[in-house]
Amino acid sequence: MKIRNLVITATVCALVLAVSGCGAKSDAMAEIAQDFGGTLQDKLGASADDILSEDASEFNNANAYEGTYYICTDSDMPAIESRVYDNADEAREYFEGIYDIFSQAYGDGFDGDCQYALNDNSGYIVVDGPVSGGNIFGERYMFGDDLYAGLYYYDNAVIVITPRNDAGNSDVEDVISRLGLPMANGENT
């Protein structure tokens, strides 16, 4: 009887921890999606002048969509950007396309640390390792042979964090950690 009670108690505790962890991850993504500029200022010390927003429908390229595009232009930080779609289905479709490519091309065979998940209205792909032979984030985000990068989806927003200029993989990892987003080593997932 005591062993049965211990097993039940342990199972309940594990479920509570799992549910609370999912809430924290979703809360972090929701906070950034809903207040991109404010969150980057509060958690990263970014200047309000470095956080730009543009009407994405005015882009004259394949990346145009109905909604707002945000980017942090602080060159001392990794590239941090967010696409906020007017239609949540379009955000999910964009993320799902990349998620499918990643899970088929890399998935569990990725030679490095990676975490990826897709739920009803959220998901993420975070990689830390070699991406030779192809890169879902684009070659311009490469930093040597390895890449630390995160792609996050929540409701109607997609957030991308990648290396830029002298801000390398360790800087990306630090930013992702400070924002409370899922990391490649499994933290915050």
Image (cartoon, rainbow, N blue to C red):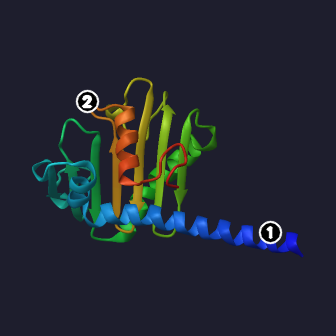
- Looking at the image, which residue is at 80% across and 69% down? 7
- Does 140 appear above or below 181? above
Left or right for 106, reference 173: right
- Looking at the image, which residue is at 39% across and 33% down? 169
User: In front here: 58 or 35?
Assistant: 35
The amino acid at mark 2 is: Asn
- Does 90 appear above or below 174? below
Q: Nearer the viewer, mark 2 or mark 1?
A: 1
Query: How far apart, in angstroms, are the residues tagged by discs 2 and 1?
Result: 51 Å
Provide residue 158's location: percent of width, then percent of height: 35, 58
The amino acid at mark 1 is: Val
Q: Secondary structure at mark 2?
A: loop
Provide residue 93's location: percent of width, then percent of height: 42, 62
- Does 26 appear above or below 8? above
Q: Residue furthest right?
A: 1
Disc 2 and disc 1 in contact, CB within 8 angstroms: no
User: In front here: 29 or 160?
Assistant: 29
Query: Residue 22: which disc?
Result: none
Question: How packed is label 1: few (under 14 Cα within 10 Å), some, or many (20 or more)?
Answer: few
| Of pointers 2 and 1, the one earlier in the residue sequence | 1
Name the residue beneath numbered marker 1. 7
Question: How packed is label 2: few (under 14 Cα within 10 Å), some, or many (20 or more)?
Answer: some
- Looking at the image, which residue is at 31% across and 32% down? 140
Q: Secondary structure at mark 1?
A: helix
Provide residue 167's location: percent of width, then percent of height: 29, 32
Query: Residue 165: which disc?
Result: 2
Residue 159 shows in the view: yes
- Does 59 appear above or below 112? below
